[in-house]
Amino acid sequence: MCGIIGYIGKREAAPLILRGLHRLEYRGYDSAGIAIVSGEKLFAVKSAGMITALEARPELKRLIGNIGIAHTRWATHGEPTEQNAHPHLDCKGEIAVVHNGIIENYMELREALQKRGHTFNSETDSEVIAHLIEESYEGVLEDAVARALKLLEGTFGLAVVHTGERKVVAVRRSSPLIIGIGQDEMFVASDVAAVVEHTSRVVHLDDDEIACIRQDGFSVMRLSGEMVEKRVDKVEMSLSQIEKKGFKHFMLKEIFEQPASITNLLRGRLKDGKITLTPNLGLARFERVIFVGCGTSWHSAIIGRYLAENLAGIRAEFEYASEFRYRKPIVTNRDLVVVISQSGETADTLGALREAKKRGARTLGIVNVVGSTISREVDGGIYLHAGPEIGVASTKAFTSQVMALLLLTLYIRQERGLENDPELIREAAAMPAKINAMLDNLDVIKNIAREFASYKNFIYLGRGINYPVALEGALKLKEISYIHAEGYPAGEMKHGPIALIDDGFPVVFIVGNDAQHEKVLGNMQEVKARKGRIIAVCSEGDTDAARVADYCITVPQTSPLLSPILNVVPLQLLAYYVADAKGLDVDRPRNLAKSVTVE
Ligand code: G6P
């Protein structure tokens, strides 16, 4: 949700921060801008569209200087025009601000500033920040920022520069921000991916901390004025992990990385039929587990409930984080709230986590990004170790989340003194090889994608643990191909969606090899009788499903509880090849952002 970066050092700032900005493009890509402090002057260039549009601007050549900030935007307030792109400047053109977040009280602040004579150049909420700092400025930028912040309500990650001072001031409230420590140079960015090329030493800012970053060091103070000693963390990510390595898109690369990401998740956690998880939260004592997340992570949450009920025999619920946080959820210290988030920064999931803690629940995070806000605020957690996921459509994080949920629920089972099924453990360990086998032959999926790329509507149906897989398949297709796709429980089809079925309406069935197999076959017959065209994802050897379906994609046999991991892979690939056949920008679908740090 908007990416920000800043630099101070000896090198030319513009090319450096633009390269870093590209690494943040997954956070938003509808407009971009940069400001460089050059001597006593400030130069800014902004552009609608992606960063490449900004880079094509001839004025960029005039941006000479060693201090700068830049921004890639996901619009909230104001259309994605050049005017609304960041950085925003004060009236005198001495202060530049880039902002990630939302200023909730900007209307009243703007009116008051206008009455006091300030001129606004954009429709954004962010511009008030530049003018407030201008009013508070008495010669020390961080003090002016601190004074301005006291008037702001909402969320922000900010980087600010002033023509008169050799520093970048950075502040965080709810929107992620890190400081990168280089050799005679320093960075500030929304995410470590933007700086990993230059340094592996980073500091994670916490809420209401103001950092004053100079070429040779930094200091951090709280909004209340006291200084804070920050820990320097070592970055795990490497540059090669955030490059495409010959794949056409990050999404395809990440689909292919799933055998490795699941292997990484299992490493050290599955041994001799036993699950090892740290830290030990005393999981056996909880009476209920509530899984929360957004988007793809919410689909994992649904699977979490199936696994918890089936394996751990524990009461379980799932919920959208954005709903959970605004209900009055009745939770106690006998409840475990499991927050699932790839990025660890999603505002609603973070809000749900804080609400759960406030109400006394214990919390556990299933998170991919190491050091992210959620990972730091939960009582305990399971890192996915899936490596950076850059394609906006989540793929490898989903399969790793499902595997992490399996480990978690098996672990609770163990803690409750119940035996684990050795066959299920063997199957879990076999998942990477089974996914690899599927990735070896993509012709069937490519052909189906070519044939159906021009259709306008799809419905995805599944039952039981494969119902969330249907939701995930539909989400992947709509996110990147802009085709209307709905996911539904197959048994519910007859209560409404069946009215849609005709020969122009492809229906994707996820046919589990489980107790509901016959029921799904019955649902397929109902579609066939109405001339619907059926694409079935089914297990190898499922001749019954193959006979009814028009097209069949087979996956290796496995335990029903692990089937979501195998069944989702063809659906990820189907969405990918449809979007690619339509010539769409798969990694940067319109209107979306990977990390949604606003509500
Ligand atoms: C955004 C992304 C989705 C993602 C969701 C939750 O909407 O576009 O792909 O599933 O956020 O993200 P999280 O990082 O919390 O898993």
Image (cartoon, helix red, strand yellow):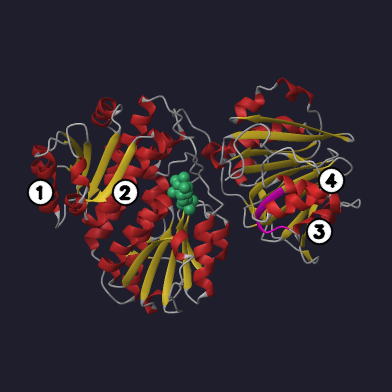
Other residues around mark 4 within 10 Å, as few (<14) / some (14–19) / many (≥20): few
Question: Which percent across, then down, holds residue 86?
Answer: 69, 38
Disc 3 to disc 1, C-alpha distance? 66 Å
Residue 84: image quadrant is: top right
- Out of 529 and 120, give the one closest to the viewer: 120
Looking at the rendering, the stretch of residues picked out in magenta corresponds to 152-158
Q: Earlier in the sequence, mark 1 or mark 4?
A: 4
Other residues around mark 3 within 10 Å, as few (<14) / some (14–19) / many (≥20): some
Disc 4 to disc 3, C-alpha distance? 19 Å
Amino acid type at image mark 1: Gly
The residue to which callout 1 is attached is 522
Disc 4 to disc 2, C-alpha distance? 52 Å
SS at badge 2: helix
Q: Nearer the viewer, mark 3 or mark 2?
A: 3
Q: Nearer the viewer, mark 4 or mark 2?
A: 4
Query: In this rendering, would 467 be left or right of 483?
Result: left
- Out of 233 and 158, give the one closest to the viewer: 158
